[in-house]
Image (cartoon, rainbow, N blue to C red):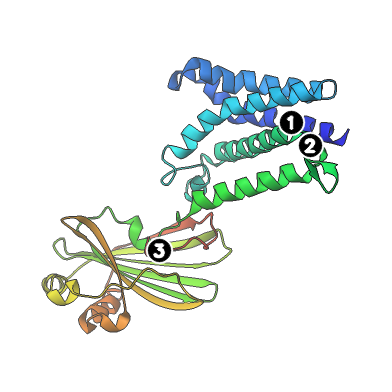
């Protein structure tokens, strides 16, 4: 009786979750084929509801029906989740500072989790009776369904969030006229990032700071902007375009240690953005002096942002 009760609960929860998460599909069916939206938003939840009842009378046919219902949804889920997987997915939304869509994505993730569980459970319940684990048929056990589902969900989460927490220089990568110097200091669980960007031709500069910790979801980031003195702008232009800067050796890609001190130069060339990790000892003294001097110049604007990291800091990679 226990395997049937478990299957009934999973089917019932999957039906409710699909009805709530994918309901806009059939209400706003113009965005996708109407038949598909009607099946996913209405037919599949109805089938799951019926399966949660009929599993007690005809379990094996019900498991087949439940599996088919779950498989009807997967093509749409895979298409929506993986079309732009490394730029946008349900997990990555939680890195955004805007929470308007959080409720929808929470429902969607819940529905997908239950779909995984319903699919795995149906497969296992349809296994031959001769498939045993410690003398008990696989289809009569409960823990394999949850173990396999948990493994699949963890794989989905890890691949979805790496490396969506990007370093501070990347946030302003669209400002093509700027040259950035990024300093990353890591002490144990604490990260401190300082980014200084200048646009000598526009006589402007910006300084960004953030402090965060491993295991923390939210942290603050502050960006200040100011005007660059014209005499300093000319010297910076000559210095940043000098052969000495262009010839800096690039540090190989490596993860941050328990205590780390890393420096990065970021600029744009004719071939696109260029990021170079460099040793502090190789950075010209004039660049380091400028890095610290700019932070003390007067600013006309300071903006504070509340940043989020769904990976809790463990996916951080300064070279991304």
Label 1: which secondary element = loop
Q: In terms of image quadrants, where is residue 271?
A: bottom left
On the rendered image, what quadrant is the N terminus found in?
Answer: top right
Q: CA distance from mark 1 to mark 3?
A: 56 Å
For mark 2, what is the residue?
139
Judge by depth and name the residue closer to the eye, 170 or 15.
15
* Quadrant assignment for the C terminus: bottom left
Task: For the residues labelled 2 and 3, say whether their Cβ atoms are less than 8 Å apart.
Answer: no
Q: CA distance from mark 1 to mark 2?
A: 7 Å
Viewer-proximal residue, 169 or 142? 142
- The earlier-in-sequence mark between 1 and 2 is 1
> Answer yes or no: do the residues labelled 1 and 2 have beta carbons within 8 Å?
yes
Quarter of the image where one finds residue 18: top right
Please tell me which of labels 2 and 3 falls first in the chain: 2
Quickly name the residue at label 3.
Answer: 222
**Image spot of residue 80 (x, y percent):** 47, 34
Viewer-nearest of discs 2 and 3: 2
**Toward the viewer: 88 or 306?**
88
Look at the picture and state if 53 lies above or below 300. Answer: above
Tag 3, which secondary structure?
A: strand
Of the numbered discs 1 and 3, the one sitting upstream in the chain is 1
Residue drawn at 73 percent across, 29 percent down:
11
Considering the numbered disc 2 on the image, is that residue within a helix, a strand or a loop? Answer: helix
The residue at which mark 1 appears reads as: 126
Seen as rendered, the residue at the extreme right is 1
State which mark lies toward you, 1 or 3: 1
* Callout 1 crowding tier (Cα within 10 Å): few <14, some 14–19, many ≥20: some
The picture places residue 47, in percent across and down from the top left corner, at 69, 20
């Amino acid at each position: 009786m226990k395997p049937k009760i478990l299957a009934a609960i999973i089917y019932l929860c999957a039906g409710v979750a699909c009805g709530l998460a994918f309901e806009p599909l059939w209400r706003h069916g113009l965005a996708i084929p109407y038949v598909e939206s009607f099946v996913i938003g209405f037919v599949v939840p109805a089938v799951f509801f019926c399966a949660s009842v009929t599993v007690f009378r005809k379990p094996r046919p019900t498991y087949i029906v439940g599996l088919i219902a779950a498989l009807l949804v997967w093509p749409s889920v895979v298409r929506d989740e993986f079309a732009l997987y490394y730029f946008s997915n349900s997990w990555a939304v939680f890195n955004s500072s805007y929470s308007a869509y959080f409720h929808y994505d929470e429902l969607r993730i819940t529905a997908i989790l239950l779909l995984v569980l319903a699919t795995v459970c149906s497969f296992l319940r349809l296994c031959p009776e001769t498939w045993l684990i410690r003398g008990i048929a696989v289809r009569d056990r409960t823990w394999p369904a949850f173990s396999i589902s948990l493994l699949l969900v963890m794989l989905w989460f890890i691949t979805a969030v790496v490396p969506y927490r990007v370093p501070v220089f990347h946030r302003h990568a669209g400002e093509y006229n700027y040259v950035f110097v990024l300093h990353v200091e890591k002490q144990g669980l604490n990260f401190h990032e300082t980014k200084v960007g200048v646009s000598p031709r526009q006589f402007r500069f910006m300084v960004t700071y953030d402090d965060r910790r491993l295991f923390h979801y939210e942290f603050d980031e502050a960006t200040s902007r100011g005007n660059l003195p014209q005499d300093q702008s000319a010297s910076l232009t000559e210095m940043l375009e000098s052969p000495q800067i262009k010839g800096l050796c690039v540090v190989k890609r490596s993860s941050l240690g328990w205590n780390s001190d890393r420096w990065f130069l970021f600029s744009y060339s004719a071939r696109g953005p260029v990021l170079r990790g460099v040793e502090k000892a190789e950075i010209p003294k004039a660049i380091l002096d400028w890095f610290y001097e700019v932070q003390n110049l007067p600013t006309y604007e300071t903006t504070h942002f509340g940043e989020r990291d769904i990976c809790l800091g463990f996916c951080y990679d300064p070279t991304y």
